[in-house]
């Protein structure tokens, strides 16, 4: 789990560095690659795992460090990411997975 | 179902309380400054790589128009060679006057040199100078060609954020070069500018150059701003609708100068 979190930290940092320093030369506006990755992680991980929640926390922390939040509140993106992760898990558990029949 | 989410929600509530306390101190500023310091070598390399890659793509995209540009440039070369001979005499006179009066960009302003390492949004940049170098919020920022870039909007210890002239909240007075026409340039976000309060009767043309004026006191005067891209007149409106193309070119930009001694 710790190894996974460390790799996630590295990937989030590289995504943000690429977005602000490399990709910004080609596009004036870019989608938030970190939030997209967080959605993927939480959508595709197993229900019992908590890696998605940890990655939401650290991904949101990097976003707070490198970007100015609309409310100028440090922690804004951490809270958004955590709510997003919890919402995806809740939605999958109660509205998608009960209706998915195993093959 | 509810029990499994209660611990997660209580952690989130605890985090909200911690962050509220955190935001009441200036600790977040120190953390950001530290991360920018650690990240600076990587971001510098990525920024430089971005410039090289975007130049390569631009060159590939412009191959078709190169032949046409080449022919028109040859014609222009002839005209300019004629002008050069007249200007050489003026240059000698100018040089002598400058030496006598001690004029120059570095004597006109007190400048601080900085490097670009990131672009947070379309209209916000991150530069490598901060409060320890004497940078303050509001300082104007220019390129080495005296093109207006924007102003310092937030200062950390070693870094600063620069709002470009196209940022939504920015507006400043300009004058049209060689015409006694003054107007207000407003940032529209997404690297776009508009020129406002130009009456219908004024004769503005596409390609007219704009410079900052000293009237509003937001920026020093005679800095290059942009060129008129499109001007629409209307009988039912008081002012013309004018779109401006900024001279600032982010894709090739690596260094900026901050004006330290500009007094509003």
Image (spheres, coloured by chain):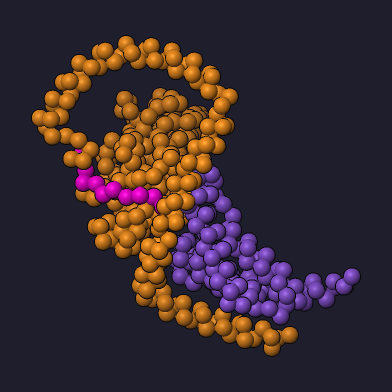
Chain colours: A purple, B orange
Q: Is residue B74 left or right of residue A5?
A: left
Q: Observer-nearest residue: B231 or B64?
A: B64
Query: Based on the displayed image, in which of its 4 quarters is residue B30 positioned?
Result: bottom left
The total of numbered circles placed on residues is 0
- Residue B22 vs B79, above or below: the answer is below
Quadrant assignment for the N terminus of chain B? bottom right
Classify B93 as above or below A73: above
Pinpoint residue B75: horizontal percent, then vertical percent: 43, 12
Q: Nearer the viewer, residue B203 or B133?
A: B133
Dividing the picture into quarters, in which one does residue B176 lie?
Answer: top left
Q: Say whether residue B211 is visible.
A: yes
In the displayed structure, does residue B176 sit left or right of residue B239?
left
Compared to B77, does B111 lie above or below? below
Q: Residue B137 location, x and y as percent? A: 31, 57
Range of residues picked out in magenta? B108-117
Q: Give percent across and percent down for residue B50.
A: 49, 46
Residue nearer the viewer, B178 or B24: B24
Residue ID at (57%, 83%)? B11
Main SS of the magenta segment?
strand
Q: Which residue is drawn at 55% across and 29% down?
A: B62
Q: Residue furthest bottom?
A: B3
The residue at the far right in this view is A103
| Residue B118 shows up from this direction | no
**Quick check: A46 left or right of B47?**
right
At a point 54% along the width and 68% down the height, the residue shown is A9
Q: Which residue lies furthest to the front in this view?
A: A3
Residue B5 lies in the magenta stretch? no
Identify whether B212 is placed above or below A9.
Answer: above
Q: Position of residue A103 (x, y in %)?
A: 89, 70
The residue at 29%/15% (across/down) is B84
């Amino acid at each position: 789990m710790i190894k996974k979190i460390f790799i996630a930290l590295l990937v989030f940092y590289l995504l943000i560095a690429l977005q602000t320093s490399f990709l910004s030369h080609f596009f004036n506006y870019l989608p938030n690659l970190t939030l997209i990755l967080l959605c993927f992680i939480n959508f595709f991980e197993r229900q019992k795992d908590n890696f998605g929640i940890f990655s939401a926390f650290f991904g949101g922390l990097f976003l707070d460090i490198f970007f100015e939040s609309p409310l100028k509140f440090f922690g804004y993106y951490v809270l958004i990411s955590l709510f997003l992760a919890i919402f995806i898990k809740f939605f999958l558990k109660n509205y998608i997975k009960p209706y998915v029949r195993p093959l | 179902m509810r029990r499994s989410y209660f611990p997660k929600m209580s952690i989130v509530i605890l985090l909200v309380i911690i962050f509220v306390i955190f935001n009441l101190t200036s600790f977040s500023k120190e953390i950001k400054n530290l991360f920018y310091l650690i990240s600076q070598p990587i971001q510098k390399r990525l920024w430089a790589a971005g410039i090289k890659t975007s130049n390569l793509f631009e060159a590939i995209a412009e191959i078709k128009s190169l032949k046409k540009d080449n022919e028109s440039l040859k014609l222009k070369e002839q005209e300019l060679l004629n002008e050069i001979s007249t200007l050489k005499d003026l240059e000698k006179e100018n040089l002598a006057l400058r030496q006598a009066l001690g004029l120059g960009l570095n004597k006109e302003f007190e400048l601080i040199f900085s490097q670009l390492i990131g672009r947070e949004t379309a209209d916000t940049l991150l530069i490598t100078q901060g409060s320890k170098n004497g940078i303050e919020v509001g300082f104007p920022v220019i390129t080495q060609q005296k093109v207006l870039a924007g102003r310092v909007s937030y200062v950390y210890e070693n870094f600063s954020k620069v709002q470009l002239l196209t940022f939504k909240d920015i507006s400043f007075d300009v004058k049209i070069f060689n015409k006694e026409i003054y107007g207000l340039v407003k940032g529209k976000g997404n690297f776009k500018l508009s020129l406002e309060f130009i009456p219908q009767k004024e004769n503005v043309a596409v390609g007219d150059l704009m410079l900052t004026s000293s009237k509003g006191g937001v920026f020093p005067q005679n800095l290059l701003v942009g060129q008129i891209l499109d001007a629409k007149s209307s009988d039912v409106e008081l002012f013309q609708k004018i779109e401006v193309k900024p001279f600032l070119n982010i894709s090739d930009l690596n260094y900026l100068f901050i004006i330290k001694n500009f007094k509003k």
